[in-house]
Amino acid sequence: MSTDRNNRSHRPKGLPQGVAGTFEPGTGAGPDPDVRPPEPPDRIELMELERLARTMPAPAPGDIAWRFGEHTIPQQAIDMRYGRDDIRLQRLVILTHADEDTRRMLAVHMHDHDWIRSHATPLFKDRACVIIPRPDPWETTGTNPPADAMPDTRPVWPHPVDTDLIAEDCAAHLDIRRSYTPTRVSRTGNETHVECVDDTTHARRSYRTESNIAHLPDGACIEQAADERWHVVHDDPPLPPPTPRRQAARTRRHAPA
């Protein structure tokens, strides 16, 4: 690097700034920070995916969508372009959600499927693949919340309910690998009907069991409301057995003449 009479360094003439050879060599070890790796070609893939997404309705609250930078892509577009497991989709996940070092290595491992899958899989849940959140009913422009956000006026179930135990029973009956939030429990005869929500997909599930997991009497139905308390939906006690007097009257009425 040349210097002037005031001992100031100057770039050689004819080389614009940013071109290799115009920087003074660094003193530290490791790769030169001024040398940038080649850019992965998946930027074009992202533009094509965004163009496809614009032809479809935007994801609604509760729908599954994919986030690539500032782009939100509906699941329908992903299914149409990639299917279940496509290496291009996983490269996009790394390109938009991985740290800088991993993105730099992506240019080297563009066709190493095992490397791409191992680095993309941890980025799927809660980062690349998301569920569009539902709006908070209390965040409205008016002073009053909507009608469905008003406090639940149904009577509170007076007996203790072990919600965690019911949630464990849901996983045991539906899928032990997932977690569930119970929402409604009813008891009819010798069967308990449990309704719940999958904590991951927010899908509603239900099942029947002979176990009286909530210790409900026959005819009772309870529901967990937004206030996290169990409220009575209905509490229809079973019909009492006929008394001896009623039974005797019925016998006399049907006795042969």
Image (cartoon, rainbow, N blue to C red):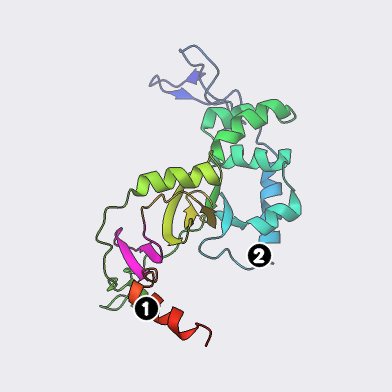
Q: Is residue 226 magenta?
A: yes
Q: Position of residue 169 (x, y in %)?
A: 46, 45
**Residue at mark 2:** 54
186 up-or-down from 171: above or below: below
Element carrying mark 2: loop
Mark 1 surroundings: few (<14), some (14-19) or many (≥20) residues within 10 A? few
Q: Earlier in the sequence, mark 1 or mark 2?
A: 2
* Image spot of residue 119 (x, y percent): 60, 30
Distance CA(mark 1)–CA(mark 2): 73 Å
Up/down of 129 relative to 110, above or below: below
Q: Please say whether residue 203 is visible from this viewpoint.
A: no
147 is higher (above) or lower (below) than 185:
below
The amino acid at mark 2 is Arg
Relative to the observer, which residue lies in front, 8 or 123?
123
Classify residue 229 by image quadrant. bottom left
Secondary structure, mark 1, is helix
- The image quarter containing residue 146 is bottom left
Residue in the picture at 58% in, 55% down: 65
Disc 1 marks a residue whose amino acid type is Arg
